[in-house]
Amino acid sequence: MPLTKRLIDVSLLLSAALLAGCGGGGGGGEAGNFTMTEPASASYEAAGYSVTILGASGGDCYAVALNDAGDVVGNCLNGNGGTDAVLWSNSNVSVLATSAQASSINNHGEVAGWLDTPAGSRAFLHQGFITQLDFSDRNARALAINDAGTIAGRWSSDKERAFVEKRGTMEEIAPELNAYAVAMNNAGQVVLKEVRPDSFRAHLWKDGVLTDLGSLGGKFTQGQDINSKGQVVGWGETPVGRYHAFIWENGRMTSLARTIDEHSSAVAVNDHGQVLIRAATATANQNLLWENGVYTDLGHFGSAFAEVTAVNNHGQIVGWLFTDTGKIRAFLATPRGL
């Protein structure tokens, strides 16, 4: 299969995992817009990081989340046209569930995600074994789990619905909105994506209180992640139709774009306020780390192309890249000296 086609396929699967479909995408530009060429060889290194290529359980693989112990979850394409949810721990890869997608892992090693069944999506919790959530007869996806074991996500019926679930008790939240949950922190703050007829909007929910995160002047706002301080990152449309990475805190949304013309998306933030950004210009895609106003270009970790997806509190970064043999593999980048 041509590399560009495989790149588009994996980008779409990754977007589904991160944004749960329905109006997502946009922030960093579609990777498939760029022609990728494999390097003759690759060292898989980035300045200040050592890079580990994570093993595959089947076909192409990508990582979506990690915890502070460096355990990584993600998904590998299987031979049936779908994905298997996988866990990488201590250099070993384990299949958690077949025909499934993992979305999040907490510091106790509990994993949230969903099963892909003929009847639709079924939200699950993995604690050494798979448990379908008690509303799994609905079309549901678990998209976030915190250290208390509380799960947040989406289920669909006549509209989009957001839920939180803790140890068997499910609560629908923000029922007044056509919205679903995309991220959550240990304080129980939940980032919601409201789907409107002509746009979507980011909100923050906590104990029944909704906060509209505002915008960068355009109609579209997408929250992607939240840390323990309540800082939310994502992307928003500007008045001239660009998509800029943002950080929201203390009631204010601030653009993290370096120029007016770039498209960018903040995909993750850790508790130290380090923000992962994917940015696209007319000539290239970049992976950036933003901290206290300073941008670090992470490059593509020695490969032809890479995309970052998550960062933990030790500054370890995961994502996926092209290997020098033409494979798409998940990777873990660890700051040197850690």
Image (spheres, rainbow, N blue to C red):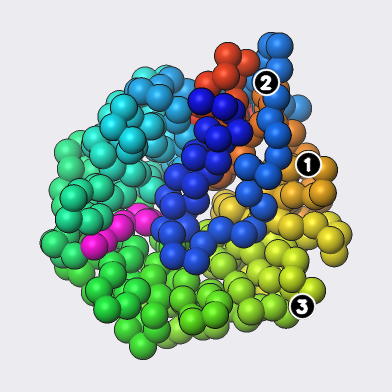
Report the residue at 49% width, 51% height from top: 15
- For the residue carrying disc 1, how many other residues have a C-alpha within 10 Å: few (<14), some (14-19), or many (20+)? few
Number of marks: 3
Q: Position of residue 208 (x, y in %)?
A: 36, 84
Residue 37 lies within the magenta run:
no
* Amino acid type at mark 3: Pro
Helix, strand or loop at disc 1? loop
Residue bounds of the magenta highlight: 139-145
Helix, strand or loop at disc 3? loop
Q: Give whichever of discs 2 and 3 has the lower sequence position.
A: 2
Estimate the spatial distance between the alpha carbons at disc 2 and disc 3, rounded to whole Å: 37 Å
State the residue position of label 1: 284
Report the residue at 55% width, 41% height from top: 8
Residue farthest to the top?
Answer: 41
In terms of image quadrants, where is residue 254?
bottom right
Q: Is residue 328 above or below residue 229?
A: above
* Amino acid type at mark 2: Glu
Q: Is residue 259 left or right of residue 52?
A: right
* Amino acid type at mark 1: Ala
Estimate the spatial distance between the alpha carbons at disc 3 and disc 1, rounded to whole Å: 23 Å
State the residue position of label 3: 239
- For the residue carrying disc 2, how many other residues have a C-alpha within 10 Å: few (<14), some (14-19), or many (20+)? some
